Amino acid sequence: MYTDQIIYSKLPRHIAIIMDGNGRWAKEKGKPRVFGHKSGVTAVREVTEAAAELGIEYLTLYAFSTENWSRPTFEVNALMTLLVETVKQELATLNKNNIRLKAIGDLSGLPKKTRETLLQGIEMTAQNTRMTLVLALNYSSRWEIVEAAKKMALDVSEGNLNIDAVNADVFSGYLNTKDIPDPELMIRTSGEHRISNYLLWQAAYAELYFTSVLWPDFRKEHFYQAIIDFQNRERRFGKTSEQVSERNLEN
Ligand code: IPE
Ligand code: IPE
Ligand code: MG
């Protein structure tokens, strides 16, 4: 089993995933794209369970980007409905497993029913402490950064914030992810090698992991593989390899 190779003391606290390839998965099977989205829920369940079992603290899933509104109306509506159904259906399991639900993105732009179900899910799991499952919905990193800059400018203009006190930490506090540590590992499925406006600020030092597996086929084993790959990398943060290697702890 892959879990034998996982070093539990070196787990990332936060893993972010770009769940991609639902449409192609369905097409391969001669089915409509929406069938791929529905099948992707199984992968969401698998990964959430695997992350919680391992002891990952935060799992952020890119479920709908602001750019995704430009898809055909039928597909957008199906995704919004699927979200409502999934949140309702999984609520008991989330509570049973002590998992807290959160969301990032412009929730005000979601259809009323989707937003209300989501907010209800967030409220009903708010006391859970084992893991936080963050859904990125109507999310765009540039939107989030612009919003943060606007809020910060307002605080400065109203005299609530001294501009000389602004640094990266202060700025982070204005983002949707303010209480969430930066992701150390970012996974994208389906063989695409891009970030697509996801957590641009937060992923400044994330290790990127790309797999050709299409999202509906993604299982616990694939998730473990990504973590093992992550654990075999040397994260240097600008230093030299000698400085960060265990043989030179004094540096
Ligand atoms: C990811 O799968 C799901 C969403 C973006 C909502 P896609 O729907 O992007 O699948 P492909 O990329 O067309 O195969
Ligand atoms: C990114 O996937 C957004 C989500 C996974 C929700 P897309 O399939 O929309 O990304 P692009 O447009 O191909 O980059
Ligand atoms: Mg895609």
Image (spheres, rainbow, N blue to C red):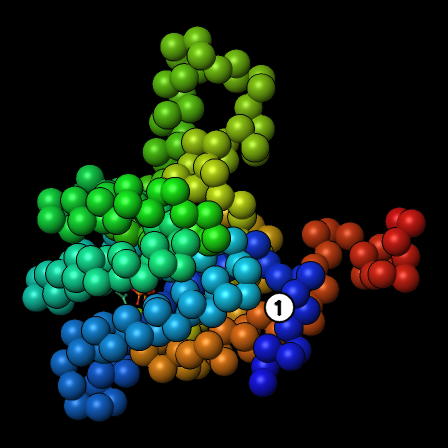
> What amino acid type is highlighted by mark number 1?
Phe
Residue 210: horizontal and vertical position, in percent?
Answer: 49, 73
Which image quadrant for residue 84?
A: bottom left
Report if residue 190 is visible in the image. Answer: no
Relative vertical location of residue 238 with respect to residue 153 in this rendering, above or below: below
Residue 80: horizontal and vertical position, in percent?
Answer: 16, 58
Residue with the most extreme front position: 96
Residue 114: horizontal and vertical position, in percent?
Answer: 16, 51
Task: Residue at 37%, 25% (x, y): give it.
Answer: 151
> Quadrant holding ligand 2?
bottom left
Q: Classify 10 Å Cα crowding around label 1: few (below 14), some (14-19), many (20 and above).
A: many
Relative vertical location of residue 69 with respect to residue 191 in this rendering, above or below: above
Q: State the residue in front, 172 or 1.
A: 1
For the N terminus, the quadrant is bottom right
Residue with the most extreme top position: 159
Q: State the residue in front, 78 or 243.
A: 78
Residue ID for mark 1: 230
Task: Count numbered badges in the picture.
Answer: 1
Residue 69: horizontal and vertical position, in percent?
Answer: 18, 56
Relative vertical location of residue 235 with respect to residue 148 in this rendering, above or below: below
Q: Is residue 5 left or right of residue 118?
A: right
Task: Residue at 57%, 54% (x, y): give it.
Answer: 13
